[in-house]
Image (cartoon, rainbow, N blue to C red):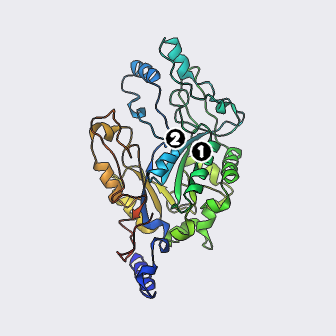
Amino acid sequence: MLAVMRFVVLLCLLSGPLLGQHDADDFRLNQIQALGSHNSYKQAISPSLLKLLNAESPGRFRSLEYSHIPLADQLDLGLRKLELDVVHDPEGGLYADPRGPKMVSEAGLPAGEPFDPDGLMKRPGLKVLHVPDIDFRSHVLTFRQALEQLRSWSERNPRHIPVVITMNAKDSGVEREGFVRPLPFDRAAFDAWDAEIRGVLAPEKLLTPDDVRGDFSTLEAAALAHAWPRLGDVRGKFLFVLDQAGPIMEVYVRGHPSLAGRVMFVNAREGRAEAAFRIVNDPIADFHYIQKLVRAGYIVRTRADANTREARSGDVTKREAAFASGAHFVSTDYYQPDPQFESRYEVHLPGGGPARWNPLLAPPIIRVPPPE
């Protein structure tokens, strides 16, 4: 099937008057590979709180010792995949008074900078944070704030290739007395989530499951036909993905077969009508599985590093496997090296730029320039 598709594309290209008339815009979204970040909103835990946490549980919080620059700055560097963790707060104020600063104060340690000087966390609506009460500092405290920043950046860069935003619906916190108990995501919460995206980003800024499915019987059928849109048709857009499985995903899908009418794609396993975008975190253990998915037509996101391990050790095995796997989007916490780690570990897209041709699905004409 893939060989036939490549041959047809080759014939179409050669049938044009001049090869130079064909550029990246003639090829499809699933033919690229781009770099992204993990927990893209995250600011560092305050030194005082981190010191206190490490004293209570040595080594337990090593995986949280990373942070990011603002979202727009990441996009300016060429990243084209971001990640947000979202919590449900319909009344407002649930996350406005985290326990961490109180713990610091009780221990007699310096309090650090206020995390919400404008009181955004008191307002009703979806919030963005990692772990309630302890890892709550964020460049975008509200989901709307994140969307507005994305819209502003896109308006300044209208020709950007689609930016993928993967998102977790966080419904768990620290099981400890006095700590917040996050609210579950029910259908009303997900409807509000979709509505907030549509309320900030105009239809022409979104690539939705309906757009990809088109006239196919299911969303998965479109993916398996490699019917992802051409880059020239989706520049300036955002593609949102709900990175959940199990009951949470089922709540979002229920009543929306093939995600009809929904804004977000979901991480549904192959064989389901909703399957089109797969999140597979381990490019070493699942290297061949990722390649199988990519060749079949699914878009895949994987990770180059996790939990600060690679940054501490300098091991690039996972990074190299991630790019070689053909996964379309590779997430990292280290698009810039972190000075706290001697390894100076970092991740860049091979060849530079915001995207390159996917090593498994590259156009058959090598003279086509890489997508930008």
| Residue behind mark 1 | 146
Q: Residue at x 50, y 49 (%)?
A: 82
- Where on the picture, by quarter, is residue 7? bottom left
Q: Residue at x 45, y 78 (%)?
A: 22
Amino acid type at circle 2 is Tyr
| Residue behind mark 2 | 41
Q: Quadrant of the C terminus?
A: bottom left
Amino acid type at circle 1 is Ala
Mark 1: few/some/many CA within 10 Å (<14, 14-19, 20+): some
Coordinates of residue 200 in the picture (x, y in percent): 67, 51
Give the structural element (helix, strand or loop) at label 1. helix
User: Where is 150 relative to 160, above or below?
Assistant: above
1 and 2 marks in contact (CB < 8 Å): yes
Q: Residue at x 36, y 26 (%)?
A: 59
Coordinates of residue 301 in the picture (x, y in percent): 45, 55
Mark 2: few/some/many CA within 10 Å (<14, 14-19, 20+): many
Coordinates of residue 228 in the picture (x, y in percent): 52, 68
